[in-house]
Amino acid sequence: MISKERYLSPEKWGFILNKLSFQLQTSVIGQSVLKQPITAHRIGNGPIKVLIWSQMHGNESTTTRALFDLIKHLHSSDGNSLLENLSLMVIPQLNPDGASAYTRLNGNDIDLNRDAIALSQPESIALKKVFDAFTPDFCFNLHGQRSIFSAGKKGKPATLSFLSPAADKALTVTPARTKAMKLISSVAGALQSDLPNQMGRYDDTFNPNCVGDSFTAHGVPTVLFEAGHYGMDYDRNFTKEMVFKALMSSLIGISSEKYLESSVEDYQAIPENEEDYVDLIIKNVTIETDAGIFKNQELAVIYQEAMKEKSVGFTPTCFAFAEKINLLAHKTVRVHEVMNKNSIKFSPGKSINIF
Ligand SMILES: [Zn+2]
């Protein structure tokens, strides 16, 4: 299986942006490790300032694709009234080298979301400079998550997840966090009919090296958005629509200040993300291991993603097996539906051939 949609190189993104019928206000805010430009777009001139960045993890392209729809909408007659109150600074691909290579890490193999204190990477410095100069009232930190997450224990897939990052070790609900939590609960409320029980919340263990925690500690309400998975939507087109809706709902809430009517308790009631899903469960498999042969097993399979000819390839790999496996799957099949034989040699992470 492959997805063309999920691979979004800076070239492809530039090509898509060039198709816009209006001129974007664009500035180069830095250069990546491999000397690619990092660009930002200033949209609107209203008093409330929102800093938004995506793809600080290069292989998380869904939110960048949603940003395209957002930028387009804000320049339409339906959407532009929102800009009376808002000024956006949008950095669509903070990690262009990772976007090119379809990797989480940057060109120095560093996770930019663990570099907020060290500021050891040019991409981290570029973001921090914009943060200092733009002095945002809100920050949106856009990410994508793997297909393994459920919204609560054994819940539905977490198609969107959120976090109001901590500001300190004690997890104090600071004024900035109160705003972020209220904003998230207003968005989760607005999207409940689109995503019933399909939204999760990340655990808020404080990590000052994470950008969201760092900006929250600086007193700026920061929301982490995670584009997740649903069903067989490996292109994440449905998820992209949901991210767009979540972004719109957030901006409308901020602009009208209606989000302040939502509650911190409702935020805390959003189920936590659990790692309860695999991509595929194959039933009635004979598993061969060094420890022996196990008949009539359920095999849990996880797809490993990697760039493959300007697309994202999904390789099925062994994850776990049991007579009755304690996991949920986006798809369940019997062995003869996907293999000519009914036995496989199992080791964790080993790729398997299925049709
Ligand atoms: Zn991420």
Image (cartoon, grey):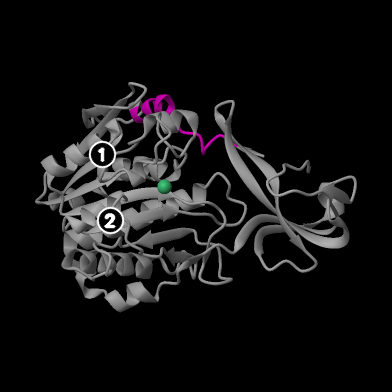
Magenta-highlighted residues: 3-17
In the image, 275 versus 142, the foreground residue is 275
Q: Secondary structure at mark 2?
A: helix
Crowd rating for badge 1 (residues with CA inside 10 Å; few <14, some 14–19, many 20+): some
Q: Nearer the viewer, mark 1 or mark 2?
A: 1
Residue at horizontal 20%, vertical 54%?
A: 138
Q: Secondary structure at mark 1?
A: loop
Residue where numbered disc 2 is placed:
213
Looking at the image, is mark 1 or mark 2 earlier in the sequence? 1
Tell me the kind of residue under disc 2: Asp
Q: Is residue 199 left or right of residue 33?
A: right
Look at the image and tell me whether residue 173 can be seen: yes
Residue 7, image x and y in percent?
Answer: 50, 34
Res 325 quadrant in image: bottom right
Crowd rating for badge 2 (residues with CA inside 10 Å; few <14, some 14–19, many 20+): many
Residue at horizontal 16%, vertical 55%?
A: 218
Tell me the kind of residue under disc 1: Leu
The relative height of residue 336 versus residue 65 in the rendered view (above or below) is below
Residue at horizontal 43%, vertical 37%?
A: 105
Per the model, the C-alpha gap separating discs 1 and 2 is 14 Å
Residue 57 on the magenta segment: no
Residue found at the very far left of the displayed protein: 47
In the image, 47 versus 312, the foreground residue is 312
Residue 298, image x and y in percent?
Answer: 78, 61
Disc ID at residue 119: 1
Q: Is residue 124 left or right of residue 143?
A: left
The relative height of residue 220 versus residue 189 in the rendered view (above or below) is above
